[in-house]
Amino acid sequence: MEKTGIEQDPRVIKPCFGYACYYCRHAGACAAGDTDLLYIPRQEIRELVAKEAAYIFDFDGSSIETPTQAG
């Protein structure tokens, strides 16, 4: 990445980084490195989620622990 000048995505250190970013309420701020919040699903996807899993919309990200760096 250094050779091509590509900067590392600031979200890469977050435990929720990956496909969930597409459905996260604060994806833009997170991609810009402006927030430390973790995954919180957007309300717009509610209709795509089964009733049995609708509890995820009450999720505030607090149950995901931010990893610590070994060193």
Image: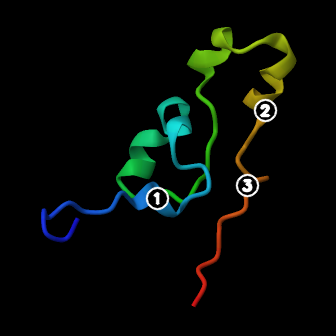
SS state under label 1:
helix
Nearer-N-terminus badge (2/3): 2
Residue 25 seen in the current view = no
Cα separation, mark 2 vs mark 1, equals 24 Å
Q: Residues within 10 Å of mark 1 (few under 14, many from 20)?
A: few
User: Which quarter of the figure is the C terminus placed in?
Assistant: bottom right
Q: Does label 1 or label 3 sit earlier along the sequence? A: 1
Looking at the image, tell me whether mark 2 or mark 1 is earlier in sequence order.
Answer: 1
**Mark 1 lies on residue:** 12
Q: Percent x, y for residue 37?
A: 59, 53
Few, some or many residues within 10 Å of mark 3 (<14, 14–19, 20+): few
Q: Residue furthest top?
A: 47
Q: Position of residue 69 (x, y in %)?
A: 59, 80
**Residue at image mark 2:** 58
Amino acid type at mark 3: Ile
Q: How many other residues sit within 10 Å of disc 2, few (<14), some (14-19) or many (≥20)?
A: few
Q: In the structure shown, which secondary structural element does the residue marked by tag 3 occupy?
A: loop
Q: Please tell me which residue is depicted at 45% across the width and 50% down the height of the picture.
A: 30
Residue in the picture at 49% in, 56% down: 35
Residue 65 position, x and y percent, is 72, 62
Q: Quadrant of residue 36?
A: bottom right
| Amino acid bearing label 2 | Asp
Under circle 2, the secondary element is helix
Whole-number angstrom distance, CA of label 2 to CA of label 3: 14 Å
Q: Which mark is residue 64?
A: 3
Q: Is residue 69 left or right of residue 26?
A: right
